[in-house]
């Protein structure tokens, strides 16, 4: 049976995730990824120019998934009080938790073709969505005194840090009386940002 090219591309992407999870991104080779799929390493060239091309496609897929999950998370939630912003943060942390390999690759520019047009476009689309959510919240009075672009950057940096700490199980190694549920922490972060403004 001949494998369809679209199927092969998807199988290579899934195999890349498995190989990266098994041995880390530095040791994940096209040969090993192809071996997982049961094809020659030359077969990868039909879809990806090189390893960075494969990893870039994985990162693009990750950002597309993040966009979809963020849109789903904020649908039907009012913008007041930064609630959509918090929901977007929860979607971000959940992606890091559920897709740790993909999430790691998304933010490792040394592994990617960082200037790839599809990657740049989807990153910008995600930032634009976050900016829209912040502006909608600010229109209701939330954190009005902080420029929207700055608030997006501060929020993203905070949520990304929380996502990495959660993914790497660092929140559980520090004894504390604080409830470390990321969703609850993100509500507190949103309230703190509003109070600082």
Image (cartoon, grey):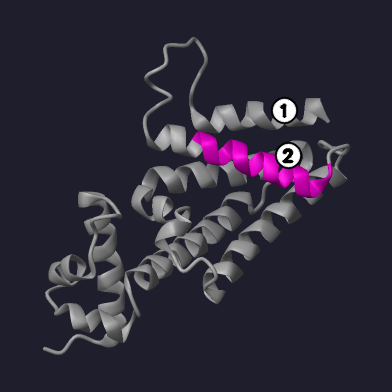
Q: Nearer the viewer, residue 189 or 34?
A: 34
Q: Nearer the viewer, residue 49 or 170?
A: 49
Q: Is residue 131 left or right of residue 156?
A: right
Residue at 35 percent across and 80 percent down: it is 49
Whole-angstrom CA distance, mark 2 to mark 1, is 8 Å
Q: Does 76 appear above or below 53?
A: above
Residues in magenta?
147-162
| Residue 142 part of the magenta segment | no
Quadrant where the C terminus sits is top right
N-terminal-most mark, 2 or 1: 2
Q: Does 19 appear above or below 45?
A: above
- Residue 65: where, in percent of width, then height? 48, 61
Marks 2/1 in contact by CB < 8 Å: the verdict is yes
Residue at which label 2 appears = 82
Which residue of the protein is positioned furthest toward the bottom in this rendering? 2
Q: Describe the element under mark 1 as helix, strand or loop.
A: helix
- Residue 82: where, in percent of width, then height? 73, 39
Q: Is residue 116 left or right of residue 26?
A: right
Q: Does 189 appear above or below 167?
A: above
Give residue 48's mark.
none
Which quadrant of the structure image shows residue 167?
A: top left
Residue at which label 1 appears = 191
Residue at 52 percent across and 73 percent down: it is 116
Q: Nearer the viewer, residue 185 or 119?
A: 119
Residue at 57 percent across and 53 percent down: it is 70
- Residue 170: where, in percent of width, then height? 40, 26
Q: Is residue 128 left or right of residue 176?
A: right
């Amino acid at each position: 049976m001949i494998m369809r090219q679209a199927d092969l591309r998807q199988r290579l992407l899934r195999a890349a995730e498995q190989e990266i999870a098994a041995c880390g991104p530095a040791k994940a080779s096209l040969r090993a990824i192809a071996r997982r799929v049961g094809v020659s390493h030359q077969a990868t060239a039909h879809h990806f120019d090189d390893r960075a091309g494969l990893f870039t496609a994985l990162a693009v897929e990750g950002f597309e998934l993040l966009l979809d999950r963020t849109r789903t998370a904020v649908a039907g939630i009012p913008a007041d009080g930064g609630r959509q912003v918090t929901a977007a943060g929860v979607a971000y942390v959940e992606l890091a938790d559920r897709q740790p390999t993909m999430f790691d690759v998304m933010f490792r520019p040394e592994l990617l073709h960082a200037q790839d047009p599809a990657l740049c476009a989807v990153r910008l689309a995600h930032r634009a969505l976050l900016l829209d959510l912040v502006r909608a919240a600010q229109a209701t009075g939330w954190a009005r005194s902080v420029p929207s672009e700055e608030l997006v950057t501060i929020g993203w940096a905070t949520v990304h840090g929380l996502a990495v700490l959660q993914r790497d199980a660092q929140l559980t190694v520090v004894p504390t009386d604080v409830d470390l549920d990321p969703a609850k922490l993100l509500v507190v972060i949103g309230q703190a940002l509003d109070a600082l403004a």
